[in-house]
Amino acid sequence: MTQPLVTAVAPRWEVGLAGTLSRSSRVRVVRRCADVAELLGVVAAGVGRVAVVSSDLRGLDRSVVDALEDQDVLVLGVHPPDDEAAERLLRRWGVAVTVHADADTAALDGALVALLDPPGPAATRTPGQGRSPAIPAAGSADAGVGESTPEGDPPPARPTPALRGGRPREEGPDDAGSVVAGSDDAARPAGHEDGWAMDRPVADGDLDDGDGADGPGADEGAGPKERTGPDEGEVVVVWGPVGSSGRSTVAANLAAELADPLQPAVLVDADTYGASQAQLLAVLDEVPGVAAAARAADQGQLDRETLARLAPEVRPGLRLLTGLPRADRWPELRDVALADVLAQCRRLARWTVVDVAPPLEQDEELSFDTLAPRRNGAALTALEAADRVVVVGTADPVGLQRLVRGLDELAGHTVAPRSVVVTRVRPGPVGPDPGRRIQETLTRFAGTGPVHLVPEDQDALDAALLHGRLLAEVRPRSAARTALLGLADAVAGREPQSRRERAAGRSRGWLSRRLAPA
């Protein structure tokens, strides 16, 4: 049975591609859309099982591809012949199967087979095999359907569409990847002369010409190192209920304590209500880094090198992706784009610390419209991608009440392990022995485990804010810094005492270099 197909391609390909698809045995063309808006409307109406889009279609980006996948539509990408850049762009947008725009019917059918008939559990590829064996060209009797492999090799596996979400799909040596289909009587990957083959998905690291240094002894001049597989970085989201809880201060200093030249960290300011990390660290940004990274992700141009350029190093091993300068620019941080940014952060750094805004409510009036941007989408997306959540509250009756209610609200948005931090701990608002009282209160009303207590240390925090630096730089032995260092030990799963001694020595060395006369 043929599947209903809709097209939305640039005018120069539209007539020829529609004619070729009309002769396909796999699909039938039910609608030819003139632009992205018409395509999304048609798909939302339930018309079409497959969508064919071209890389040069005006308005096409990652969010459009994501919207099509949300409607359970399979996406086939077409690009100009021999245009590898356009092919890579489609892959970065999440299009798993691509074909040359001038491909013939056999080549299109071969690509549609890969798109419509995903591999079963037994479909694998021989470990260590660089590329799957080619499928016969269109001239053979079984082109696009049958499989021909060298003697002794198992048949190649057909690819599945790339998965969505904040974390990229992990590929092992046996995974099948994206399909590239071409012209010349067969769909073929760029650089191949015979047939069409199934290649693994193009990772951003595959697009670079660097030497690929990735170990602790790699040369610093080789550029940012990619982290994949078991060494993929972790995302730690710092969230807290509304109020002056010190969330941003905790996020900045936690990132600094986790950061190390050999295990770098990225601090992402995703607070769409009141970004403050640039001011806390005295960074002058003409363009908000997080907005630029999200825009690059939407356009399929975000890779490790681009992200490293947008996130300057503010301390050895610590990069900062600055936030939005005004709250009314929140639509620039679309959910899908931010998820891609966090996925690239995982590859760039061992730790990604994300500072998000307190509100988590959904836009109920717009919930029927899946394409509408969510006002709190940045915070919700970060929580969905989080490997751990650090919840920050204040040590006073109002702050503790908000913290208890916030913990209950947070449970509906993430299942990631959480660490509870209470700042500005002092006897005044809660009475004698404030640490014990706060712990008992949160255990009783919120069921929390051990709570990390940050004592009131206004002098140290004022000094850090005055100089635009971190506690480790201006007050390495302060009580607040010691407490936050203990939090970092807990998050990283490191032995507290040895970590504290190493960090204190490193902080003194860094501070002496910063204060040394020129």
Image (cartoon, grey):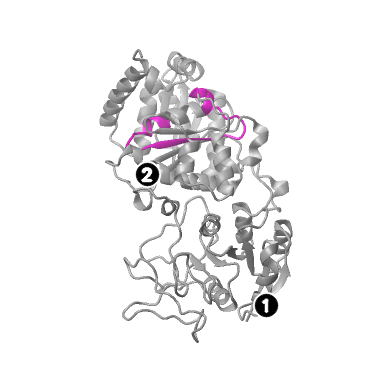
Give the image location of residue 250, x and y in percent: 46, 28
SS class, disc 2: loop
What residue is shown at x 51% (from left), y 50% (from top)?
A: 166
**Residue identified by numbered label 2:** 225
First in sequence: mark 1 or mark 2? 1
Vertical placement of residue 181 versus 287, above or below: below
Circle number at residue 22: 1
Instruction: Specify the quadrant that holds the C terminus.
Output: top left
What residue is shown at x 55% (from left), y 61% (from top)?
A: 95
What residue is shown at x 59% (from left), y 48% (from top)?
A: 298
Query: Would residue 124 appear left or right of 94 to someone viewing this image?
Result: left
Q: Nearer the viewer, residue 224 or 326?
A: 224
SS class, disc 1: helix
Vertical placement of residue 370 versus 312, above or below: below
What residue is shown at x 49% (from left), y 85% (from top)?
A: 140
Give the image location of residue 384, x and y in percent: 52, 47
- The question of residue 259 being in magenta is answered with yes
Vertical placement of residue 197 versus 229, above or below: below
Vertical placement of residue 82 versus 332, above or below: below
Q: Nearer the viewer, residue 20 or 374?
A: 20
Report the Cα–Cα distance between label 1 and label 2: 47 Å
Name the amino acid, label 1: Ser
User: Which region of the structure is painted magenta?
Assistant: 254-282
Quarter of the image for residue 156 reads bottom left
Mark 1 packing: few (<14 Cα in 10 Å), some, or many (20+)? some
Give the image location of residue 276, x and y in percent: 55, 27
Instruction: Specify the quadrant that holds the N terminus.
Output: bottom right
- Asked if residue 92 shows in the view, the reply is yes
1 and 2 marks in contact (CB < 8 Å) = no
Mark 2 packing: few (<14 Cα in 10 Å), some, or many (20+)? many
